[in-house]
């Protein structure tokens, strides 16, 4: 099997199982655990893009992760303000 095809299939596998794990997985209240649960499908998406074009994969992975982390940090801060 070619390395590119293997990367593509591994990306599909991580994306599908990671998405199902985030949706139907354990209901955690800790925002850090939710952030880590989202990283698995994100890595799968990056591997799928990597199978097609390396530059596109790296730019997309960095952009998506930056946005997700900013949203979650803002949600953590708002949650702490509401609890106080």
Image (spheres, rainbow, N blue to C red):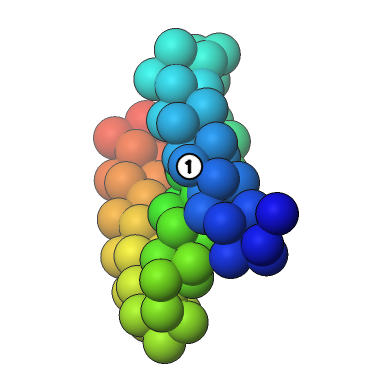
Q: Position of residue 77 (x, y in %)?
A: 36, 51
Q: Position of residue 65 (x, y in %)?
A: 42, 64
> Callout 1: 10 Å neighbours few (<14), some, many (20+)?
some
- Return the residue found at the far bottom: 55
Which residue is nearer to you in this view: 76 or 33? Answer: 33
- Return the residue found at the far front: 1
When the figure is inspected, residue 2 is found, relative to residue 58, above or below; the finding is above
Left or right of residue 26, residue 67 in this image: left
Please tell me in which quadrant of the rendered image residue 36 appears. Answer: top right
Please tell me in which quadrant of the rendered image residue 3 appears. Answer: bottom right
Please tell me in which quadrant of the rendered image residue 74 appears. Answer: bottom left
Q: Position of residue 42 (x, y in %)?
A: 46, 52
Which residue is nearer to you in this view: 44 or 36? Answer: 44
Which residue is at a point 60% across and 46% down the rendered structure image? 10
Name the element at disc 1. helix
When the figure is inspected, residue 21 is found, relative to residue 67, above or below; the finding is above
Number of disc labels: 1
Which residue is at a point 52% across and 54% down the rendered structure image? 8
Q: Position of residue 32 (x, y in %)?
A: 56, 42
Any part of residue 2 in sight: yes
Any part of residue 61 in sight: no
Which quadrant is the C terminus positioned in? Answer: top left
When the figure is inspected, residue 82 is found, relative to residue 61, above or below; the finding is above
Which residue is at a point 35% across and 80% down the rendered structure image? 56
Left or right of residue 6, residue 77 in this image: left
Which quadrant is the N terminus positioned in? Answer: bottom right
Which residue is at a point 45% across and 58% down the rendered structure image? 48
What residue is pinned by disc 1?
12
């Amino acid at each position: 099997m070619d390395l590119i095809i293997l990367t593509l299939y591994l990306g599909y596998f991580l994306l599908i199982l990671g998405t199902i794990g985030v949706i139907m997985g354990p209901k955690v209240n800790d925002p850090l655990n939710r952030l880590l649960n989202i990283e698995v499908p994100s890595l799968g998406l990056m591997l799928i893009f990597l199978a097609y074009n390396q530059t596109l994969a790296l730019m997309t992975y960095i952009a998506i992760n930056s946005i997700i982390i900013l949203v979650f940090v803002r949600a953590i801060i708002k949650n702490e303000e509401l609890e106080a």
